[in-house]
Amino acid sequence: MRKNNSKKIEQSIGDRRIPGRGRRLSDKFNQIVLDNIPISLITINDGGYITSVNKYFENNSRIKDYHNHNIYKDKFFFEDNLADDYKKMLSGEKKIVRREHFYEKDSQGVGEDRYFKIIAVPYKDKDGHIEGAISMALDNTDAVISKNKLVELNKILEERVEQRTEELHNVNKELNKTLELKSIFMADVSHEFRTALTIMQCSLELIAKSEELKDDNLDLFRNISTEIKRVSGMLTDLALLAKPHSNITARLRFEKIDLNSLIANVCEKLRVVAAEKNITIEHKYAGKPAKIMGNIEDLEKLLTNLVRNAIKYNKENGWIKVWVAKAEDAFCLNVEDGGFGISELDLPHIFERFYRADKSRNRKEGGSGLGLAICKHIAEEHGGYIGVSSKPKVGTLFVVHLPVKFDNGYF
């Protein structure tokens, strides 16, 4: 049977014999190749009848007797109009290439559902007329099933990701709402506390002016007044950090500001404080305006906090230098001092709320621990950022990057 099949295939696809002594060796080689390749290989004539098959087809096909078997009457070729493609090919159209041809098990449940990759090409006689075709079918069921499983897994994964994303979005939405309510509450409470402290401060000042107040109680009243001012300042700082800022509300409060004018005003106000330690404050003015869009009150608070810290953590007879430098799309506000510096251990934490680098300082000198956190907040509110470099016993340099132009443009 195998020998006859080989001859039929050889006759169908053309004469491939090698002349002379190599003819028998060539026939044997062709037979070995055809019978051992893991592909179902058949030839058909121009009427659709199978003329020859290889051994792989015999072992794996449901067709037990292929002689005079017409593919147009076979269930395998009924699937997905495959038979029509063969008719078109044999009538002169292009070759057939199907990557996933499905072949369902028979009605009695015999066999398995399989997928095949099919390639069929016509062959012609010496005059160019189509005599038949060579058809190859490769069983790629495992690859197709694996691919389908992967597609299904990806679909399930996408659904889960979409579900988790939606859940996360809802959680973030609720969290933002809670944070907004918390910010409003903090701002309202801070306002009420500051109002009460203002009343207390005014009452103390009236008592201090009373003729009945003894001199030895003046220090007590001054201490109370100082603490009231300190707590009021902390509440102001907390309110600034707590209040909600949207881009729209923040920009509505912005105006054109010359940073050199801002530096001059702040330095002038704080020279009196610096004089107590005989510290000089120098405004290094280059003679050119440095204009940005910003909130004058917030930027003044930022600069005041930096210069006050430079005074507080400076040496007697020390120095402070303040200036503006132009960057690519920003102005850099620089505050440098020759003071005590900041240790490497403290440096990563100084912008955290309530963090104090020098925990040995008393309440009056130490502040609330919110100053640098507020500076960072204000810088970010203006679309910029703040950085620091420091060396213990040498000094510290703070640099605030403030963009000249925001996304929607001001200049």
Image (cartoon, grey):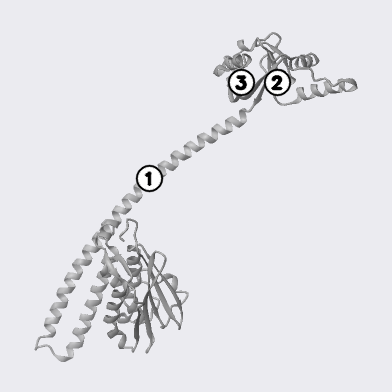
Amino acid carrying label 3: it is Lys
Q: Residue 94 carries which label?
A: 3
Estimate how packed mark 1 is, as few (under 14), some (14 to 19) or many (20 or more) residues with alpha carbons within 10 Å. few
> Taking 269 as reference, is 18 above or below it?
above
> Taking 66 as reference, is 369 above or below it?
below
Picture residue at 20% right of the left edge, 85% below the top: 220
* C-alpha separation, residue under disc 2 versus residue under disc 1: 55 Å
The number of numbered discs placed on residues in the rendered structure image is: 3
Residue 352 x, y percent position in the rendering: 38, 68
**Of marks 3 and 2, the one in the foreground:** 3
Question: Farthest residue in the top direction?
Answer: 68
User: Circle 1 is placed at which residue position?
Assistant: 167
Amino acid carrying label 1: it is Glu
**Of marks 2 and 1, the one in the foreground:** 2
The secondary structure type at the circle numbered 3 is loop
**Disc nearer the start of the sequence (3/2):** 2
Q: Which of 328 and 357 is in front in this view?
A: 328
**Disc nearer the start of the sequence (2/1):** 2
* C-alpha separation, residue under disc 3 versus residue under disc 1: 53 Å
Rendering quarter of residue 331: bottom left
Residue 263 x, y percent position in the rendering: 31, 76
Residue 255 x, y percent position in the rendering: 26, 65
Answer whether residue 76 is visible to the viewer in this image.
no
Q: Nearer the viewer, residue 201 or 23?
A: 23
The secondary structure type at the circle numbered 2 is strand
Picture residue at 48% right of the left edge, 40% below the top: 157
Query: For this view, does 339 lie left or right of residue 38?
Result: left
Estimate how packed mark 3 is, as few (under 14), some (14 to 19) or many (20 or more) residues with alpha carbons within 10 Å. some
Estimate how packed mark 2 is, as few (under 14), some (14 to 19) or many (20 or more) residues with alpha carbons within 10 Å. many
User: Circle 2 is placed at which residue position?
Assistant: 41
Query: For this view, does 63 lie left or right of residue 108?
Result: right
Question: Farthest residue in the right direction?
Answer: 21
